[in-house]
């Protein structure tokens, strides 16, 4: 009976481990982002809801993104972005080599807030071994970049 209990506990543990590793997603609050141009820092408010453009025009933000599967080279897909506001947001997701040069990028524009997927066709950016991720967005006035969700493959 004792052996049966141990075997059942081991099998249950394997089942949980398999499910837990199915998705390796990272959710990034937009408040991690900052002004692309340092002189425009005062054009943004950082809140628990993200980064808000409080200027009278569109402004660029840049966002560092966590990548913890350093040896994985299958890329990131899907990449989801949530924002609130009106107008058009334009974002580019970058996969970079360790040197900082761009390995691959994907672009998407969206209008009038909500969730959008990058890229729309589902073929995400590939990433080099030991590389990094980053995103830049051109944020409309009074808009907030709330969340960036990245699934590493």
Image (cartoon, grey):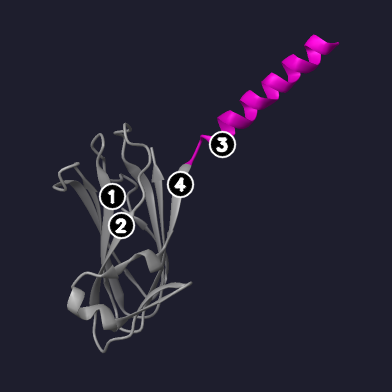
The residue nearer to you, when weighing 45 against 113, is 45
Question: Label 3 crowding class (10 Å Cα cut-off): few <14, some 14-19, many 20+?
Answer: few
Q: CA distance from mark 2 to mark 4?
A: 15 Å
Mark 4: which secondary structure? strand
Question: What segment carries the magenta color?
Answer: 1-23
Q: Are marks 4 and 1 in contact (CB under 8 Å)?
A: no
Residue placed at 30% from the left, 61% from the top?
63
List the residue tagged with mark 1: 133
* Image position of 103 with respect to 80: above or below: above
| Residue at image mark 2 | 64
Q: Nearer the viewer, mark 2 or mark 3?
A: 2
Label ID, residue 20: 3
Indicate yes or no whether the magenta region holds residue 11.
Answer: yes
Q: Residue at x 39, y 79 (%)?
A: 85
Q: Secondary structure at mark 2?
A: strand
Q: Quadrant of residue 70?
A: top left
**Pointer 4: what residue?**
25
SS class, disc 1: strand
Snapshot quadrant of residue 15: top right
Separation (CA) of disc 4 from disc 3:
11 Å
Q: N-terminal of the two: label 2 or label 1?
A: 2
Q: Sequence-wise, which precedes: disc 4 or disc 3?
A: 3
């Amino acid at each position: 009976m004792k052996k049966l209990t141990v075997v059942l506990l081991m099998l249950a543990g394997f089942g949980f481990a398999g499910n837990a590793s199915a998705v390796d997603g990272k959710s990034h609050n937009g408040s991690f982002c900052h002004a692309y141009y340092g002189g425009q820092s005062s054009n943004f408010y950082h809140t628990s809801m993200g980064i808000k453009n409080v200027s009278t025009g569109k402004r660029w933000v840049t966002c560092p993104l966590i990548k913890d599967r350093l040896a994985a080279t299958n890329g990131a897909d899907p990449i989801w972005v949530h924002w609130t506001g009106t107008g058009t947001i334009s974002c580019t997701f970058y996969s970079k080599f360790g040197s900082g040069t761009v390995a691959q990028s994907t672009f998407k524009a969206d209008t009038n807030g909500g969730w959008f997927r990058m890229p729309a066709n589902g073929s995400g950016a590939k990433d080099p071994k030991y590389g990094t991720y980053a995103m830049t967005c051109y944020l409309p006035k009074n808009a907030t970049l709330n969340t960036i969700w990245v699934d590493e493959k």
